[in-house]
Image (tube, rainbow, N blue to C red):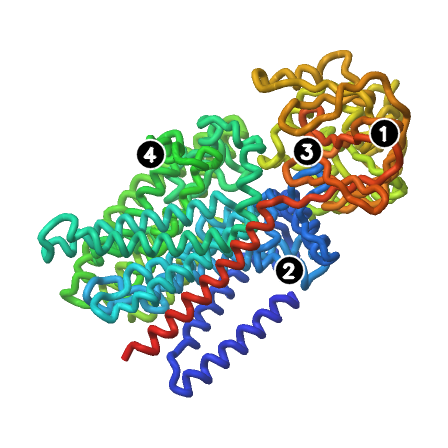
Amino acid sequence: MSVILLLVGVWFLVFLLAYWLHRQGRPDWYKDVLAAGLLGLAAIGYFWRILIGDAYMPADGGDLISFLWPTYRFAADSLRSGTWPLWNPYLYGGAPHVADIQAGFLYPVNLALFLLVPGFGVRAMEGLGILHLWWAGLGMYVFLRSLPWEEKTSWRVGRTAALAGGLAFAFCDALWIHFGNLNYIAVVSWLPWVMTCFGRALEHGSGENDGRWRDLGWAALGGLFLGIATLAGHIQATIFIAVAVVLYGLFWLYWEFTDQKRDCTGFWDTLRPALGRLIATVAILAVVAFLIAAPILLPALQLAPYSGRADWTYQEAVGYSLAPPQWIGLLIPGFFGRGPQLHWGPWPRVEAGYLGVLPLILAVLALLARQGRRTWILAGISGVAFLLALGIYSVPHGWLSALPGFNLLRAPGRFMILVDFGLAALAGVGFQALIRASAASNDWRALIQLEGGLRWGARVLIAIIVPLTLAVLLLTQDRDPEIYIRMAVTAIALLLFVGFFLASTALIAARRAGWARPGTIAVLALILIFLDLASTGAYFDIGTKNPATGFDHPEIAAFLSQEEDPFRIDARTGIDQLWQPNTAFFAEVDDVWGLVNPSVLAYYERYWEEMGSRSSQLYDFLNARYVIARKDVELDWDKFELAFDGDPDLNLYFNQRALPRAQLVYQAQVIDSSQDAELVWSAVHAPAFDPSQEVVLERGETKLLPELGEAAGEGSVTWLRREPNDLLMEVTTGGPGYLTLSDVWYPGWQAEIIADGVAQRQPVLRANTAFRAIPLWQEGTYQVRLRFQPPGWKVGWLLFALALILLVFIALLVWWERRQTP
């Protein structure tokens, strides 16, 4: 609550400043600040139960708490300690944190939270979600206010109409239903901001004083916004914004061609100026966005061929497509149940992008009243996006998946965010037509047409749908309880739709008949839009149990903290309801696994899945010293023994045969896998293979040790420093051999052998299919240092610096051009 009061105070100061500037002769920006405040008030009203601490959303925490919160806390702790969170040592045997684009630790909003609020908790994560929904609504408000919506006139959407569009977009299903996917809604919240800049760059007037550099400046600003959005960490959402840009540009090009062809002599003469403008605008936007996001994009691109997604089939990529029966969700969101608890459809739950009844009606009014290029561009974006959202039920999605990268994306149903973007903008245009329509105008004629259709729809609902719904509900009350619950859920959804449809029809009729002033109609319409979206969405997927309780195991954490040598735990024993899979981040212990993550390295995942039981030596090689499981778990009791039972629900079991994290081996199998990649895999899984005595390597260009015979000596490994990106060991070896680590291999790890103050580079080899080995050429005692320095990280920062230089250069050109323009 204190944070809300602080934000209200900041808003009030900004409002006073804007009002003072208006009194000094500046534009009336204070009205826009007021609109931003009303959007904020709507967000408070929508999420009031979360804000007063009465409930949690999502009900079980979802990815917001189980994945993103510990991930963000790890990054925050690393940054405050002065270390970049490049490598994650705690999960999956070690993983490239910087390459997991979902980490989002360079996103400015996240950075502010990380540095200003140490130890932030669940409420802060929920607050970020609410903030971005508000930001999305404000972006739609700005988008609607930024462009003229009728050719050759200055007809613009007023503030009240823009506020209506902002409300519809901020609380549409395509956004709030992903409240648990904070990184997704964070990226998507920038969609209207990017489109505002792109539209301004394309749609600025014509003539000698167009302001060429000013238009490119708008494109660069759009690229900056898209780059910042990408840093939030959801590449699918970034691609959605890119698709919206491309679709807007293509539809704009078509309208430019049709508008100008009468004044030109040939096809190419007509197309060339508009095409050049479009290419330049898209190029500037794309280049700036890529350069800004390069520090995370380049490492993510490096990870792509190593992750499990690289082998996805089209069938896997089209999971969560929008099935045709779900289309009814555009009008009746709860027809097949609402939220994960009540969904009863025979397909994966995909929300259809409900926008509210009145906004949909207003979108229709916009198309009837304002049949210009911008309304049809928005309609085109929504239409194409709807086809793509159908996924496997639509051929166009298959064509799109043939493009590089699209085969790595899942859940085509999320394309509904672009559908809702276009419809929400059209709703704002329709709202303006509703309240500004005058007799004999095109707006008024469209209003008459719309009212006639709504009256017929109301008659059908009252005469047929309502009685039929109640009859079905009565006839199924003595049937199977599950069937009755499903029918009851559907009946509630239908009757809610009927209620909001009739209310919308009455509002349109009141405007048509002149029963109320346009201002009163506008206020009532805003209230109706909010009540519709809040009533059908605000209370779903809410729980009263704190989802962070699964991270709180102080007794186990205290016991594990007594260990000095590095070790791993194994909590992959079906205890997710008691022990959150990413608890290792908070307990600061290393885990063999974590929460299901599509960015997990494929070769490590295969090693785990195919190593056999916990009784195998391949399991021991993982350095899994403790298994965390329920008290009635079944284990190999010849190998495991009870180590700790002080937790009320879980026990720790000690693995007596766990191998150390780093060890010396003096035998190696060097296999040429150029003809058959499975040869190495087969050697590791051979019954005679003993990872405590030998290592399996792939023959390549790297110079390996000569063939080794019997063990040259025992040797020892002593840990001197263990940091996420920097490891230091003292090694004593009796002869040439290999230092093997059960840490996962990944490009970017560099090794040095330090003897007598002189450091010599050594390769980090891929060992036992998924891990690391360092060749040691001579006997003696020396230090071995490993540092993680991914090349994409450094290059990314150089490109980021180039982006800043480019932005400053464009800003100077815009400033110079404005100085030269009368």
Q: CA distance from mark 4 to mark 1?
A: 53 Å
Frontmost of labels 4 and 1 is 4
Place residue 143 in its image quadrant. bottom left
Q: Which residue is mark 3?
A: 745
Task: Tell me the kind of residue under disc 1.
Answer: Tyr
- Alpha carbon distance from label 2 to label 4: 41 Å
Residue, disc 2 = 113
Residue at 50% across, 81% down? 16
- Mark 3–mark 1 Cα distance, whole angstroms, equals 28 Å
Say if 71 sits above or below 320 in the image: below
Residue pointed to by mark 1: 653
| Mark 4 in CB contact with mark 3 (< 8 angstroms) | no
Q: Residues within 10 Å of mark 2 (few under 14, many from 20)?
A: some
The amino acid on which the numbered mark 3 sits, given as a three-letter code, is: Trp
**Badge 4 is on which residue?**
396
Which label sits in the foreground, 4 or 3?
3
Identify the residue shown where x is 45% and y is 72%. Answer: 34
Q: Mark 3 near mark 2, Cβ–Cβ under 8 Å? A: no
N-term mark: 3 or 2: 2
Q: Marks 4 and 3, Cα distance to the nearest angstrom?
A: 39 Å
Between 494 and 529, the one lying in front of the other is 529
**Local crowd size for mark 1, using a 10 Å CA cut-off: few (<14), some (14–19), many (≥20):** many
Q: Is residue 675 among what the camera can see?
A: yes
Q: Is residue 452 visible?
A: no
Q: Earlier in the sequence, mark 3 or mark 1?
A: 1
Badge 4 or badge 1: first in the primary sequence: 4
Disc 1 from disc 2: Cα separation: 38 Å
The picture places residue 425, in percent across and down from the top left corner, at: 34, 56
Q: Amino acid at mark 4?
A: Pro
Q: Is residue 170 left or right of residue 251?
A: right
State the CA–CA distance, disc 3 to disc 2: 32 Å
